[in-house]
Amino acid sequence: MSQTPKKDFVFRKHMSIGEVDAENDTRFLRDCFVDTGDFDVLEDTYSSQCIVLGRTGSGKSALLERLEECGEQVIRIEPEELALKHISNSTILSFFEEIGVNLDIFYSLLWQHTFAVELIKHKYNIDGPSAKSNFFDSISSLISGNRKKQQALKYIEDWGDKFWLDTETRIKEFTDKLESSLTASSGIDIPNIKFTTTGKAQLSEEQISEVVHYGKQVVNNVQIEKLAKIVNLLAEDIFTDPQRKTYILIDRLDENWVEDELRYKLIRALIETIRKFRKIETVKIIVTLRTDLLDRVLEKTRDSGFQREKYNSLFLPISWTKDQLEYLLDARINSLLKNQYTKLDVSFKDIFPKKIDKVTSSDYILERTLLRPRDAIVFVNSCFSESQGKTEITNAIMHTAEKYYSSGRKESLEYEWFVEHPFLGKYIDILSQNSSRFKVSELTKELLEPLIIELVDTPKENEDLIVKSANDYYNSDYPESLKHFNKFTQNLLYTLYKVGVVGIKVDGTSSVTWVHDKTQDLTPTRIKNTSIVYIHKMLWRALAIDKRA
């Protein structure tokens, strides 16, 4: 049975129910982990779902933190350990990419080599030349009768002299070896060739053709088929104990650790590599990805033959229900206050008002989230902050806390989507001082043209679909301009819907569609002038929305 803290309870400075990032939230993750059913699936090495998908703050990193805490054999690879900036800054690789040599095989090879070496190094505690030699000797004798597996083993050894060193050093060594092969003088009879991004301009068409031919030969000679034998070797001869499960964890791939074009190719190659390693039943490679980043990977690498349907079985989409988030808040509040102020359990209802604006306090808070743990935790922490020195949380305190929470969520959205929509803040501001719901037709030319003019002539690297639509409208004449204006409005509202700022009621027979609805199927063209737009309550205070509508 719950009870309120004792009468002399006072909210203290810095009191909180957790941090916004899982790495700094270890106490609450350990004591208050809420399993929505995803953890068991992730822990099961026989389950194919290993790419955790979700928006920022949905709990992807928390799942990996939990797995690292519970799993016995866990290898965590940080993005900065992958030497991806070293690859990105390679003028030699950039040169061959520029002239048309497909390096996808190399990127796939890089991931496969990295995982194979990490697994072997971890299992056999290889920490120096002697341990490396002992491993190769013992495995060689074990597979002495299998020539293909012997070749695979030698392949790992040949491409990894610094086998026992850190991941970053080994990847740099691996990349440098490919660079050396590509720039070797034999095979290219072109004097003074410059392997730089500007080198292409100094070559004739015939010379470019010759270099492309040679480059393709080198890349193909990395002998990807031998690497396939490595996976067989790991599955059939090394990782065979079903009681000894091993996990490789990679988190934070959505951070800007390398230029976007290369990142997309590397992530696509990573997904394909994970699929190959599913053959090793006692090993599971687990990666977290933001849903929008995956969508960009699919879009940017579409010409390379990447088809989402082939990989759907790998994806584990993260979502939360209102009941699960209420349980999470109860668990964290109880962990914070129990034993410090009372011996009995303390829940959300014990410290928040029963009602606020005619709804329960939990409904009030969760209606102002995107049904993500981070949003709910931040709102409650904001209430605690405003209650410092007080003995209770009042309606007035919650309204004050909402003001700061709402502004913070707007900033968070702009940061989350900056790569894809650099001007999202301007798009959101179009809704300022509006009614909480309105018809699409109310977004008139007089209202939107100042934004359109501001977006025109935006540099190519900052262009999104809305900027393109703005240019199409600005550079067109009537009647084409009317069509382009409608398209601009559709793309603007669809983007605001996609990031969670608005919900759309397409017509009189449909319900309001929000992006976190699992059944959502909204497209820009379905948004009509008669459709009704609902601004998310999360932003009402930040945008000074008139909620009387």
Image (cartoon, rainbow, N blue to C red):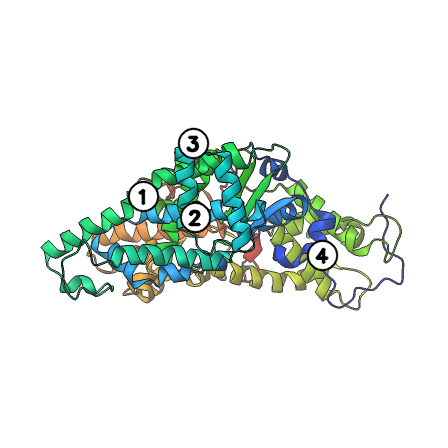
Q: Nearer the viewer, mark 4 or mark 1?
A: 1
- Residue 43 vs 411, above or below: the answer is above
User: CA gap, disc 4 to disc 2?
Assistant: 49 Å
Instruction: Give the labeled residue for mark 2.
Output: 157
* Along the line of sight, the residue nearer the viewer: 143 or 387: 143
| Mark sitting earlier along the chain (2/1) | 2
- Quick one: label 4 or label 1, which is nearer the N terminus? 4
Q: Residue at image x 75%, y 65%? A: 387
Q: Which of 157 and 169 is in front in this view?
A: 157
Residue with the mark numbered 1: 302
For label 3, the SS is: loop
The residue indicated by pointer 4 is: 17
Disc 1 marks which amino acid? Arg
Name the residue type under label 4. Answer: Ile
Q: Are marks 4 and 3 in contact (CB under 8 Å)?
A: no
Q: Which of marks 2 and 3 is nearer the N terminus?
A: 3
Q: In this view, does 332 lie to the left or right of 219?
A: right
Give the residue at mark 3: 146
Gap between marks 4 and 3, in whole Å?
A: 57 Å
Within 10 Å of disc 1 (Cα), the crowding (few <14, some 14-19, many 20+) is few
Mark whose residue sits in front, 4 or 2: 2
Secondary structure beneath dot 1 equals helix
- Does residue 486 appear in the picture of this structure? yes
